[in-house]
């Protein structure tokens, strides 16, 4: 679909619904939503709220969010966490509990996650566990968080032995994606978010993949209409998948295309060295090669996906961790069963499945796709 066919940014915001029975909630998508109290009308009633953000995002957007919430809560506290994937751990999580207890927060206190996926995942996990569960709202400010991490209720922290290994499924009450926040994202972070946008094409929607190919330069240039469509379509696809398989008993695993290789890159290099989206982008190149070896796609498809990932500003050559180390790290993946790695592969363009793969095949892929 050409870019001109997409709606330009305007009020009212676009809305995508996550349909999960009594845990259903809306995702609102639009520019300027953070400044508008109406964006938060669906927030549960309570006396107090805690905005959890970080030292980078809070100075940019916490004041606006506080103002938008002023009429809904008697007190709105702000907690600024240290910024970075390296802080997505138990120690930082505990800062949220310290703040909640320190403020005398009760069971109705609403948590607002203002930031990217790191803040969102940690705040969600804190909400899932404080007093066995308090309501929370996602206010994602990175492209990656708007198209993926804020939606669907996966919350977690990292462990030195594995990424996102400690967490819970816990749905937010509302997701508010203010597209205006994407204009202050560093370019590397924008590219990282594009990895998760691109992901939705090969696993579910090749028409969307075509659209991304046509509009990749506009997306990299942060064209507001292009970003609006990319966020909305990504959320629609994620909503469809999560609505059918909230707890990843099957289908939802397809959202992890590229993530098995990607998580190995992230933890193998040390969290924060490569961005999550960068590792996923490169991981999708590897997973595409594996899909080709398993007969799901041809070389032309692999080349097309690789080219798009490169045009999005993402790395396409994996770090030289060594095949043994990659395999060791990938066995810690949550999809592994009895030590056997499972990969999300493309079984035909626009469709994904979970598959085992012989180590020898994986070693071939790593030899082809990694530096050194
Ligand atoms: P991030 O949260 O680290 O944010 C990236 C950087 O951008 C940070 O430095 C942040 O402070 C800064 N930032 C955020 N918004 C900004 C803005 N508007 N302007 C300027 N700077 C801004 O990284 P991320 O890519 O958003 O999220 C990655 C995390 O999400 C990983 O931990 C990953 O595991 C997790 N994740 C979770 C899910 C899920 O389903 N829960 C899905 C995908 C990824
Ligand atoms: N990001 C993968 C999932 O939400 O399942």
Image (spheres, rainbow, N blue to C red):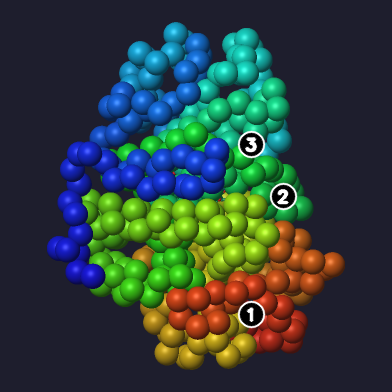
Identified at 42% across, 90% down, the residue is 300
Q: Position of residue 119 (x, y in %)?
A: 53, 37
Q: Contact (CB < 8 A) between labels 1 and 2?
A: no
Mark 1 or mark 2, earlier in chain: 2
Q: Residues within 10 Å of mark 3 (few under 14, many from 20)?
A: many
Report the Cα–Cα distance between label 2 and label 3.
12 Å
- Residue, x 40% and y 71% (percent of image)? 205
Q: Distance between the residues labelled 1 and 2?
A: 24 Å
Between 83 and 11, the residue placed more toward the observer is 11
For disc 1, the marked residue is 366
Say which quarter of the image contains residue 114: top left
Local SS, label 3: helix
Q: Is residue 21 above or below residue 367?
A: above
Q: In which quarter of the image is residue 96?
A: top right
What residue is rendered at 75% in x and 66% in y? 336
Coordinates of residue 253 in the picture (x, y in percent) = 61, 63
Q: In this view, does 54 lie to the left or right of 360?
A: left
Residue labelled with disc 3: 125
Q: Is residue 227 left or right of residue 146?
A: left
């Amino acid at each position: 679909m050409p870019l001109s066919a997409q709606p330009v940014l305007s009020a009212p915001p676009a809305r995508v619904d996550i349909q999960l029975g009594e845990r259903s909630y809306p995702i609102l998508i639009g520019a300027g939503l953070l400044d508008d109290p109406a964006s938060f009308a669906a927030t549960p009633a309570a006396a107090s709220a805690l905005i959890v953000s970080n030292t980078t995002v809070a100075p940019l957007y916490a004041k606006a969010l506080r103002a938008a919430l002023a009429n809904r809560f008697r007190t709105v506290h702000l907690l600024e966490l240290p910024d970075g994937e390296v802080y997505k751990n138990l120690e930082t999580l505990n800062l949220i509990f310290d703040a909640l207890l320190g403020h005398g927060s009760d069971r109705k206190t609403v948590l607002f996650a203002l930031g990217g996926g790191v803040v969102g995942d940690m705040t969600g996990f804190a909400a899932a566990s404080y007093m066995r569960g308090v309501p929370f709202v996602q206010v994602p400010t990175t492209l990656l968080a708007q198209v993926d991490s804020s939606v669907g209720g996966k919350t977690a922290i990292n462990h030195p032995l594995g990424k996102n290994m400690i967490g819970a499924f816990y749905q937010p009450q509302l997701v508010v994606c203010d597209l205006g926040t994407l204009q202050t994202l560093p370019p590397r972070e924008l590219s990282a978010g594009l990895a998760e946008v691109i992901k939705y094409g090969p696993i579910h929607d090749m028409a969307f993949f075509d659209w991304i190919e046509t509009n990749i330069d506009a997306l990299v240039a942060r064209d507001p209409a292009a970003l609006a469509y990319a966020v909305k379509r990504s959320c629609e696809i994620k909503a469809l998948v999560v609505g059918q398989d909230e707890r990843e008993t099957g289908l939802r695993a397809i959202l992890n295309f590229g993530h098995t290789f990607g998580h190995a890159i992230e933890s193998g290099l040390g969290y924060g060295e490569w961005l999550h989206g960068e590792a996923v982008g490169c991981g999708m190149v590897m997973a595409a090669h594996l899909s080709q070896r398993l007969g799901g796609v041809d070389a032309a498809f692999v080349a097309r996906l690789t080219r798009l990932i490169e045009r999005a500003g993402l790395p396409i050559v994996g770090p030289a961790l060594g095949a043994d180390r990659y395999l060791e790290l990938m066995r810690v993946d949550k999809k592994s069963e009895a030590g056997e790695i499972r990969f999300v592969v493309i079984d035909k363009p626009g469709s994904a499945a979970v598959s085992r793969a012989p180590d020898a095949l994986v070693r071939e892929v790593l030899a082809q796709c990694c530096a050194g």
